[in-house]
Amino acid sequence: MSATSLSTEFAPAVLERVLVAGRSTGAGFAEVFIEDKRSMSAALDDGRVEQVTSGRDRGAGIRVIHGDTTGFAHTSDLSEEGLLRAARAAAAAASHGGGGVNSVSLGEMKRHLVNTVQIAPSDVTKVRKIELLSQANDAARGYDGAIVQVSAGYSDSTRRILVANSDGVFATDEQVRTLLRVSAVANGDTGMQTGYDSMGYTIGFEMFDEENIDELARNAARIAVTKLHARPAPSGAMPVVIQRGSGGVLFHEACGHGLEADLVSRGASVYRDKVGELVAAPNITLVDDGTMSREWGAIGIDDEGHESQRNVLIENGVLTDYMWDYIRARNDKRPQSGNGRRQSYADLPMVRMTNTFVLNGTEEPDDIIRNTEKGVYVAKLGGGSVNTATGDFVFGMTEAYLIENGEITAPLREGNLIGNGPQVLRDIDMLGNDFAMGNPGTCGKDGQGVPVGDGQPTLRVTSMTIGGTAA
Amino acid sequence: MSTDSASLDQLQALADRVIEQARPGEQIEVSVSRGGHTDVRVYQGEVEHFVSAQDQGISVRVISNGRTGSSYAGTLQESAIHEVLAEARENAELGGVDEWAGLAEADGVAVTPQQLWDETLVGYSTEKKIDIAKQLERLAVSADSRVRIDDANYSDGYSEAAFATTNGIRGTHRSNSCYASVSTLAEENGETQTGWAYAIGKNPDEFDLDKAGREASERATRLLGAVKPQSKKTTVVLDPFVTAQFLSIIGSTLNGEAVVKGRSLFANRVGEEVAHPTVVLIDDPTDSRAYTASERDGEGLATRRNVLIENGVLRGYVHSSYSARRAGTRSTGNAIRSGTGATPGVGCLALQIVPGNKSQAELIANVDDGVLVQSVQGLHSGVNAISGDFSTGASGLMIRNGVTAEPVREFTIASTLQRMLLDIIEIGGDIEWLPMRSTGVSLVISDVMLSGA
C-alpha cells in the first residue's frame, strides 16, 4: 500500500481553487478536510480467529460557513473535479443565493506528528498481529478453570489528515493508534460474569514491546472470576472511592462535556456563566491536553487544523475556561483551543475532549480507604453518560467492592452510579497522589465517536447514589 | 464509471463481476452500496447546518478452506475493488479454520414485499425540509414560555445496494427514510430540564409535528422541580421509548451467536417460561409499519416473522446462517451488517412486544405506588446482557394512588433482565414506532429497586 503523504498529493493551488469554489455563493469561510485512513482489525472469539478485516476510508469533507449557517458536503472522489463538485454542493447548502468574487491563499504548510511512531503497523505482518490474540486467549483461559469464553480484538489505524481553509490554515497530521482488548466470561453457580480490559495508545506496534499482554488478559479473567462471588450492589447514597486511572470518565461526564463551548453557548450546560467561580472542591485541577504524547486522545492538530494544546479547565476548584472549536471561538472572538474534532471526513467537526484528567492531590491512596468506614470502592469503571443541561450523569462500575471499616471487602455485582456533576465536584473530599491514565475510550456525541483518554489519582466522593438492588 | 449515477443494474453488474473471479473452492460474498443523506439543523429560526452527503462502498467476504477474511473500501473505483478482493483473500489466509464457516444458502423462503421506497420523499425540496425543522422548532416552543430549543432537526437518507454470492444469492435493494427530531430545554428558577421528541413517516407529509412539539415541551416542563426520591422497592411504568430500549437489550440475549458461544443467559431454555404469560415477543421486519422493516437480511436471505417468546414461553433465538449451522438449525434471516466493513453478525431486526389494549393513563390508574420512567440514562454502562444485571439512571414522575405526582430525577432503577421479564404485570396498547430496531409500548414492571436518597 502506498504511503504517499497527503501534503505531496494535493497541491496548494488545487486546494485554493476548491476553497474559492466553496466561497462562490458569498460565504465568508470555506474549509477542506482530507482524510486517508487505513485500518486493520482482527478478532478472536471462541478460540478461533474469526475475522480479519482491513479497510480504507479516503475522502474529503468541505465545510462552508455563511453567516451563522454551515453547509457541508463530502465525497470519496479526491480528484480536483470531485473536490470542486463537493465544494459547490457545500456552498449551495450554506446559501440559496448570493455570489461574488473571492480569492484564497494558503499559508505555509505546517506538518504535525503526534509522536514518533517507531514501528508502523504497516511494517508488521498480519500473522504477527494475530499471534497476539492467541496469546491473550491462552493467558485468559489459563487464569482459572471457571473461564468459559474469551474474545480478544486487535486493531490499528493510520489516519492521515490535511486541513486547508480560507483563513490560510494549511496543516497535516498523521495519527497512528494501536489497540488490544480482551473480554472474558466466567461461569459459576450464580450464573455468568464478565471481565474486560484493554490497552490503547497513539503509537505503533512498539506498544507490545512496552506493555504486557498476558497481564492484561489475566486481569480481564480475574475480574470475571472475582464477580462470581459478588453480592448485589447496595442501593442508596454512600461514600465512593475510585481507584486511580479508572475514574477519569467521572470527570469526562461530570463536567467535561458541560465545558464544551457549543453546549455552553446553547445554554445546555450547568456550567454556563460560571467562569471564575468555584465549581469544584479546591483540590481539583482539571486539564484537557491533546499534546499528551502516546495517550489515546493525543493529536498533532485538531480536525480544523488547529495545533493541539494543553488547556487548564478548572484550577484549584475555579472554572478557568471552556473548550472551543472554530465556530464557537469565532463567535466569542477568542482563540480556538484545539478541540474541534470529527469522527471522519464525512462528519462536521464540533467541540470534543482529547485527554482529560485531574492532577494529583496529596493523600496516600491507602489512607483514603482507611478513612472510609462504609462505602463502595470502584476499581474499574465502564462507560458513562451525562445530561449536560441538568448535570445529572451516570457511570457503570464493572469492578467494585464494599468498603467496611476502612477495608476493601466483598466484590459487588455491576450497576450504575448516578450523581449530579456540580454537586459531585464539590463533594470530592480526598484526592490521592498516585495519578494514572485509564483505559482508552471512545467518546460519543451527536452520533460521532472519537478516541479520548482520561485519568485521575485515587479519590473519594463523600456521597453518590449506588444503583444496586440490595436494600 | 461515474458511480454517482450508477443504476441499481450497474451496481448488480459490479457485484457479479467480483464473484465471477472466485477461484475453485472459494466462496465470495459482495455487497456494493451507494447512498446519501440530508441533515438539517435549525436553531432559533435559522439553519445552523445543512449537510448533503453521498456515500458509497464495497465490502467483500472470502471464505476458503474454512477460513474467513473480509475487506472494505469507501469507494467504487475499479482499482479499489481489485484491492479489496485481494485484501480479503489475504485476510482469509490468516483466519482460524472454522468448520461452520460459510455463506448463506438459498432456503426457498420468499421475500415479503415491502414498500421501502417513497417517491414523495424523493421529490421533497430542500426548502420544504428546512421548513419542517423550523415548524417543529416553533411548535415545541410555542406552547410554554419556559421552553427553549436545544436543536430541531430534519434527516433523511437513502441507500441502493446490490448483493451477490457464489452460492447464487443475489439481488438489489433500495430504501429511503426520514424523521424529524427536536430537543428542548425548560427553565424555571435557575433550574433546567430537558425534553425531546421524534416524528417519523414514510415521507414528511406523514409526520405528526403537532404531537412531537407537544411531547418535547411536556417532557421538559413536567420535570421542572424534580427531586431525588427515597430508595425503595417499587413498580415502574416504562414510557414507550424506554421500553423500546429495554427490548433491544432483551433482543441481544436471544441472539443465536451469543447462544452458541455460551454468552446468553437464555441458552438451553427453549420451552421454559422466561416471561410473564402475557408476553409475546416477536421480531418482525416484514411488518411494514416498523422503521427498520426490510426484505432481506445481511446475507441476502428473505426476512421473516420470528416468534421469540410466546405467552411467556421461550420459543427460540434469532440466527444467521453461521450461528444456525453451529446450533444445528436454519437461519431465521437475522444476519445484520453494521457499517460497511464487518462480516455479518446476528441481531433482531424489528423487535416488538405484542401490545395490550390499555392507554398509559389506564395502566397508571392500576398502580398505587410507583414511578413513571420517562427517560433512562446509561443503559450501555449499567446493564450487562451476559450476567443479566440491570441498573440504569432515570427520571420521571412518581405515581400515587393511580395518578402521576411530583417529578423525580437523579435516581436509578435496578433488577435483573431475568426478573424483569417475569415481573411484567401489564402491557399497554399505546404502540409507538420509533427510528430504531425496537418498537415502544408502555410496560408495567413490579419489584424494581429504586435507588435515590
Image (spheres, coloured by chain):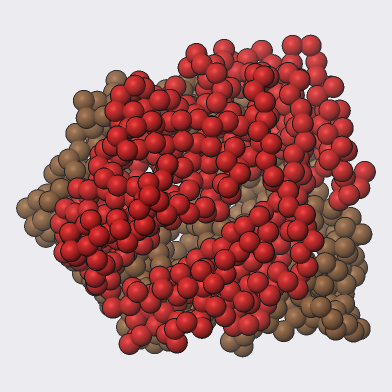
Name the foreground residue: B307 vs A314. B307
Residue A10 lies left or right of residue B46; in this view the side is: right
Q: Quadrant of residue A446?
A: bottom right
x 91%, y 83%: residue: A101
Q: Nearer the viewer, residue A450 or A158?
A: A450
Residue projecting furthest to the left: A405
Q: Residue A237 location, x and y as percent?
A: 17, 61
Residue situated in front as seen by the camera: A379 or B89: B89
User: Which of the 4 quarters of the picture holds residue B43?
Assistant: bottom right
* Placement of the C terminus of chain B among the 4 image quadrants: bottom left
Query: Could you say which chain is coloured brown in the image?
Result: A
Determine whether, in the image, residue A33 is placed left or right of residue A237: right
Instruction: Answer above or below: position of B225 versus B310.
Output: below
- Left or right relative to A255: residue B420: left
How far across and down, in percent of the image, does residue A453 sit? Answer: 47, 57
Outermost residue to the front: B357
Q: Is residue B348 above or below residue B317?
A: below
The red-coloured chain is labelled B
The answer to whether residue B452 shows anywhere in this view is no
| Residue at 43% over, 25% down | B316
Residue depicted at x 76% and y 64%: B124
Q: Residue at x 9, y 51 (%)?
A: A404
Q: Quadrant of the N terminus of chain B?
A: top right
